[in-house]
Image (tube, rainbow, N blue to C red):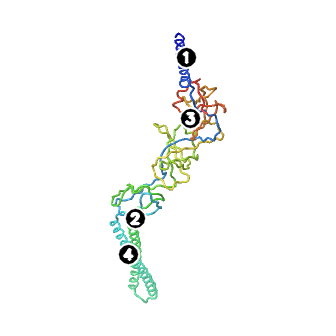
Amino acid sequence: MHYLRTWRRWQKLVLWLLSALALILIVRFTILAPLTISAVSIERRSLTAQVYGNGTVEAKVVVLVSSKVIGRIETLYADQGDKVESGQILAKLENEDFRQQVLQAEAGVSKSKANLAAEEANHQKALANLELANKDFVRVRGLVERELVAQEDVDYVATALEVAKREVERTKAAVEAARKDQLVSQAIEALAESRNNDMVVRAPQDGIVISRDLEIGATVAPGSPIFRIADPTIVWISANVDESTRNELAEGQEATIVLRSMPKEQLHGRVARIGLESDRVTEEIEVDVMFDPPLTSFRVGEQAEVHVITRTKDGASALPVAAVTSKGKQRRIWLVDKGKLRLREIVTGIEDRAGFVEIVSGLDDQALVAVAPFSVMVNFKDGMRVKVRR
């Protein structure tokens, strides 16, 4: 009986020791187990430094097309999206009054031409009469010397000659007056035709109609746009870029453009112009990135993103961006050394869109660097035990 009680005590003690050992093992391999993480080493990559900006599609040259006179739109010959050529008729206004003025002016020109022709005929007749009167005067004066005619006859032909001279002068002046009248009539006709032509609205240049702002029947006033025409050869992205990157930018640098309507397609571009004034609120400058080659179809005002390539480097020492943390301007990594984390400061260079950053100094090529989500890395501590996932 005593032996049985002793055996039960030992049995309980063994069970308790086994339970304690199991609990210790559970804690050791769960709560106290080292964190399992991924780790990477430096690799050699080609990296590209880029400056990011967002903006909108804009045309450098946008012309507002309006009429020179007040009128009601009678006909429209173009619409949004149409390609037009310089001088092409885009619209006509009601012009009956101006057309009547042109007819009246044409009649005035015809009348002035007829008057000029009549005055020129009178002048030619006067010249002929003058020539005849001069011959009579010469003939009679010869007869006087031979005493074959009376003085009265001489006085008569002399008077006739003087009258012929005065008639030539009068008809000459009448011809000049008729010519001036004709010039006035022609000027009135040109003015009437100009006013009549003003009722026809033409394209001032080659381009694409990006908007039609008025419709048939609308009354248009001088300066009120009927159409807006853009020059398709100079279409670019007006992008807003952080002013701190200004010294990295230069005209002619290559860039990639992603339009909101084509999010999976990268278009090629080049920096065409860099703004000289920063926005005092957003601390950004405007950079114009031209499409190269030009777009055949575009929508002014469409949202777009640009990445300007400022420099490239082949064979750079690189780590994934996820392995690098920041504190202020300092860049740091968590080094895995003999199963423990060690915080180390590094100097970085180019940060690529592909998710890699250049390591300029502070790290050996063979070193292991911890990689983990940010939510995990914020809990890292120097000397913390970790296990690298294989």
Say which label, 1 or 3, has the lower sequence index. Answer: 1
Above or below residue 385? Residue 260 is: below
Mark closest to the chain's N terminus, 2 or 3: 2
Please tell me which of labels 4 and 1 falls first in the chain. 1
- Residue identified by numbered label 1: 14
Could you tell me the amino acid type at mark 2?
Asn
User: In terms of secondary structure, where does tag 1 sit?
Assistant: helix
**Local secondary structure at mark 3:** helix
Q: Quadrant of residue 313?
A: top right
Check whether the beta carbons of the residues at disc 2 and disc 3 lie within 8 A of each other: no
Which numbered disc, 3 or 4, marks the residue that appears first in the sequence?
Answer: 4
Question: What is the three-letter code of the residue carrying label 4?
Answer: Asn
Q: Which residue is mark 4?
A: 115
Q: Image height check: is 316 above or below 156?
A: above
Q: Secondary structure at mark 2?
A: helix
Amino acid type at circle 1 is Val
Q: Foreground: 180 or 123?
A: 180
Which of disc 2 and disc 1 is earlier in sequence?
Answer: 1
Pair 1/2: label in front: 1
Q: Residues within 10 Å of mark 1 (few under 14, many from 20)?
A: few
Marks 4,1: beta carbons within 8 A: no
Q: Secondary structure at mark 4?
A: helix
Q: Which residue is mark 2?
A: 197
Q: Quadrant of residue 3?
A: top right
Task: Indicate left or right for 215 with 288 as reference.
Answer: left
Q: Identify the image quadrant of the C terminus.
A: top right
From the image, tell me which residue sits under label 3. Answer: 322
